[in-house]
Image (tube, rainbow, N blue to C red):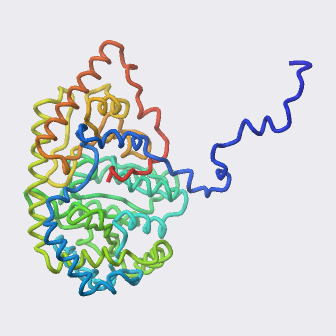
Amino acid sequence: MAGSPPPPPGAVAAAHVSLDPYVERYAARTHGMRASEIRALFAVANRPEVVSLAGGMPFTAALPLDSVGVMVADLLRTAGASALQYTGGQGDPVLREQITQVMALEGITASPDDVVVTVGSQQALDLVSRVFLDPGDVVLAEAPSYVGALGTFSSAQAEVVHVAMDNDGLIPAALQEALDRLAARGRRAKLLYTVPNYHNPAGVSMSEPRRDEVLAIARSAGVLVLEDNPYGLLGFDEEPRRALRARTSDEVLYLGSFSKTISPGLRVGWVLAPHAVREKLVLASEAQVLCPPTFSGAIVSAYLRTQPWLEQVKVFRELYRERRDATLSALAQHFPAGATWTRPTGGFYVWVTLPEGLDSKAMLPRAVHARVAYVPGTGFYADGGGGRHLRLSYCFPEPDRIREGVRRLAAVLSEESELRSVFGPHATAPSGSKDRGRRAQTPAPDLA
């Protein structure tokens, strides 16, 4: 307005002041780091009255804890000084030899020299990203994909291009189409990320014929395959499937973990890589953590040496199969027409597709109010899609709690459908479209 006095000095600048005084100093890679939008709900979702079908938490109470306690005490008594000391950046040689024996169950022949022990397989994901990915590089990943991997690739400033999957896992034709589209843009992919066994979150497994076909396509395109396999020993009715890494040693980086077969709290995983790549991974790990946790590694090594651990894996398999069955029967009994879901033959998860018009992210607060929690599908897509999907985890609750949780969730679906029929398609905001194009969210611990 004419004649208005000028703003006082500093007023304009003050309007742009950030609540974070360090915002101008952060590295560009931090722009891809986002907190999970459902993390704030965990304090509520973890209350005892809430049935949580959200977290992929192994049922560690089934471990022989008394025997493990004696084992740990004996470890401290006989080898405590070394178990509490630094170790080499690659990890203890004895543990690495034992890891090769674990992988042999999936047909993998490997040298301990090519194994790098990591702080869970999550660190292995980060190390591979540090070694291979520059900002703007392309990573191909299944749609949907493990949220922790998406967060890692986002932090590396990579572009994630999703590849469709179905009940037989990654679709080879869709992989070839994605590669062709990239080539038409003058781009190529650096990595193909896949969880071939009992997929997180989809619960499906890659069929045997597709495994060779996917490897052939990746080899032809010069794309390294990143095989993430934490659930491979947890099949319910079958022997462990032959790993991708068992079929070729040069084109596959294999990630493994003891989080699902022993304990996630020990944080012991590994990466098996070609020899030249292994050297880079060790250097990256030493720069990051100096060495993997010696005591945790010693506990895992002693457990593999002294405990009937394969029998314990069978206990877990039976336990999770019972809970899978409870989930599937409850879904069939309570869920409405128009909803579909996968039927996993191992692992921890069922992937649900909601009836047309429902949005899992918008529905979550109502579900928690109804005392049931799940993970919305949007967290498993780099492009913000997945609003019509959700992940149910059956590994932790008892079967009766699972059935009750599914019943409560079905009631929420019924309420959401009624709201939509009364108020129209805008009764719940479509979070998938709102968030499309945003970077993947950083996973909260309960989203493993």
User: Quarter holding the C terminus?
Assistant: bottom left
Please give the name of the residue rendered at 14% of the width and 79% of the height, measured from the top-left corner.
Answer: 306
Q: Looking at this rendering, what residue extends furthest in the right direction? A: 3
Q: Quadrant of residue 385?
A: top left
Q: Is residue 212 left or right of residue 346?
A: right
Front-lying residue, 237 or 413: 413
User: Quarter holding the N terminus?
Assistant: top right
Task: Name the spot of residue 398 as percent of width and height, x first.
Answer: 14, 46
Task: Name the spot of residue 111 as percent of width and height, x first.
Answer: 28, 83
Front-lying residue, 10 or 49: 49
Q: Is residue 328 above or below residue 321?
A: above
Q: Is residue 384 above or below residue 169?
A: above
For residue 327, say whether it is visible.
Answer: yes
Task: Name the spot of residue 50 as percent of width and height, x first.
Answer: 25, 38
Please give the name of the residue rendered at 18% of the width and 77% of the height, measured from the top-left corner.
Answer: 71
Q: Looking at this rendering, what residue extends furthest in the top direction? A: 422
Q: Is residue 283 above or below residue 24?
A: below
For residue 142, say whether it is visible.
Answer: no
- Tally the marks: 0
Q: Is residue 1 left or right of residue 35?
A: right
